[in-house]
Image (cartoon, rainbow, N blue to C red):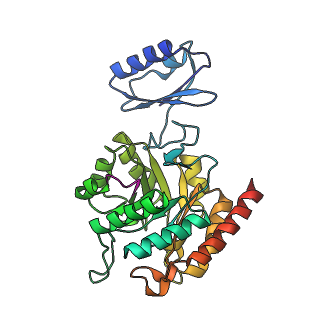
Amino acid sequence: MIAVLKRGTTDKEMQSLINWFEDQGLKVHVSKGEYETIIGLIGDTSRIDADLVESLDMVETVKRISEPFKKANRKFHPDDTVIKVGDTLIGGKNLTVIAGPCSVESEEQIVEVAKAVKDAGATLLRGGAFKPRTSPYDFQGLHEEGIKLLLTAKKETGLPIVTEIMNANHIPLFEEVDVIQVGARNMQNFELLKELGKLNKPVLLKRGLANTFKELLMSAEYIMAGGNEQVILCERGIRTFETYTRNTLDISAVPVLKELSHLPVIIDPSHATGMSRLVKPMAFAAVAAGADGLMIEVHNNPSKALCDGAQSLTPAQFADVMQGVEKIRKVIE
């Protein structure tokens, strides 16, 4: 249930209403927008008389929300959420580009790539330290050493870093990581999500290979219910009957998720297609659809990459994509 307050409602009046809701055993979420203030109620609202609440002088209207996700729901928070990472703003009318290699392989590699993507316009650096691989014989990442190398690249370039977590026990290793990524395979690792909900750190949540929009938002709800409302949604392709591409990029995720939720939505065209030559057109499509950002894999020598070289762009190719992205932004603005 949500209660929309009338303009001119004082803080004292609002707090009195909040106290009454809390006395009924409900959790209260307040969203102050430019034109209205919304009080969202979480819990068993069946015993709340909506007509009685709506009759209060300070209340404009009362609505019941049927969707199980509350905090992630746009009805609770009509204005777009904007998440600050260093000097970068993610969400709203900003376009954020996260770029870097699939896996951190060496200091020379990650620093070289970091400098190249920054020069081309990227504002965050991605790189895998812990890598979930289908085969147990594939490269699994450098683990703690990989995070240290990412921090070295951050020191060299100033770019905030994004890297994937695999296990809640690893959280202490991520203390200096700017954005923690939850990969597709862990989207419904609810125990991990609950632990991330206790942090005051942005979480980039990727959609699972075969998960619905509702399931993605419910996973975001797990994090937000714990108190951490800094969640970024990422569409990275879903598994369909098509086998030509690695996955199928569901570009409809951008408008649908933006309709359902206030959280930022970014697109990962690299994992979605699995082919470097398809990254550029899919990145353009994502920007045209209104995505808040892109996550693109870039490697200084893709043919010798230890992970996902086939879908990685060279620094020169990435710079070309960035030039096209800027042109598309100007058109749609």
Is residue 221 shown left or right of residue 3?
left
Nearer to me, 50 or 184: 184
Kindly identify the residue that appears in the image at 62 percent across and 68 percent down. Answer: 283
Nearer to me, 171 or 142: 142
Q: Position of residue 196 (x, y in %)?
A: 32, 49
Kindly identify the residue that appears in the image at 38 percent across and 61 percent down. Answer: 151
What secondary structure predominates along the stretch shown in magenta?
loop
Q: Is residue 172 above or below residue 17?
A: below
Nearer to me, 112 or 217: 112
Q: Is residue 250 visible?
A: no
Kindly identify the residue that appears in the image at 61 percent across and 77 percent down. Answer: 317
Q: Which residues are magenta?
A: 175-180
Nearer to me, 119 or 333: 119
Q: Is residue 238 above or below residue 139?
A: above
Magenta span contains residue 178: yes
Kindly identify the residue that appears in the image at 35 percent across and 53 percent down. Answer: 176
Is residue 179 shown left or right of residue 3?
left
